[in-house]
Amino acid sequence: MAQADLGRPLAGQVAWITGGARGIGAAAGAALAEAGATVWLSDVLDCDGAVATIRAQGGEAHGRQLDIRDRDGCRRLAEDILTAHGRLDALVANAGVCPAGRVAGDWAQWSRVIDINLHGTQNTIAAVWEPMCANRRGRIVIVSSMAWYRGGVIVGTEYTASKAALIGITRHLARNGGPHGVLCNAVAPGFIDTAMTADFPQGDLEEIPLRRRGTPEDVAGPIRFLCGPDSAYMTGCVLNVTGGIVLAA
């Protein structure tokens, strides 16, 4: 591999990142663009700021406002990406919500969280699955949470349930996509400082071996790895990005 390729292992590839306007999604978009990919960011929020940041750093990025609960909208975006570039190499299924909650929360919140985190993620997967299988290549990276194995205290049961279900989806896609060249893995972040968690209690840093909360960039690196050539023999895996808090699980 040429030296130039080492710095841009995703050169020529195209990636779609959901929830890309801010936080982990925006950081993942920047990381993939830095690695050479053309990135498409989608979000219910305006993605212009994240797109402008990537372009200012020399990357190629596009954005679209999209609610992943809109199944047809997800399909149209995937089709538009394929029409524009002739390929769609990676999906980073990051979009989701994380409201504070209780074990016996209200049904409206349960329905909303499951609809976005689970049904919405499946909408994006359905939009890219057949093209990836037909092309016999593709990477799907699903953003879960440490809540799937550690349980949640601040968040409600619906959040933990949705993130656990995403691990099941990851393994199902890995088994079924492998024969078609489609790899599916997940990342399970711990306490990450984002706008979504800004109002949450800070928690006890003594519980985290690294003694700090994570940053979106801490999660973006593993996502980039799972989209790149160095993870070519990995599928069905879950990377815990928790600062070591998994040791206390």
Image (cartoon, rainbow, N blue to C red):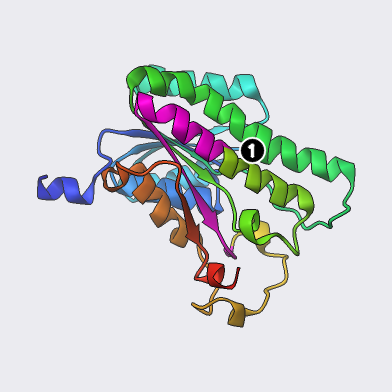
Q: Residue furthest left?
A: 2
Category of crowding for the residue at label 1, using alpha-carbon neighbours closer than 10 angstroms: few (below 14), some (14–19), many (at least 20): some
- Residue 17 percent location from the top left of the image: 48, 39
- Residue 205 percent location from the top left of the image: 60, 79
Nearer to me, 193 or 180: 180
**Number of numbered discs on residues:** 1
- Residue 234 percent location from the top left of the image: 36, 44
Q: Quadrant of the C terminus?
A: bottom right
Q: As drawn, is 146 to the left or to the right of 210?
A: right
- Residue 138 percent location from the top left of the image: 37, 31
The residue pinned by badge 1 equals: 44
State yes or no: residue 204 in magenta.
no
- The residue segment tinted magenta is 169-193
Residue drawn at x 37%, y 17% as measured from the top left: 134
Above/below status of 57 relative to 201: above
Q: Quadrant of the N terminus?
A: top left
State yes or no: residue 174 in magenta.
yes
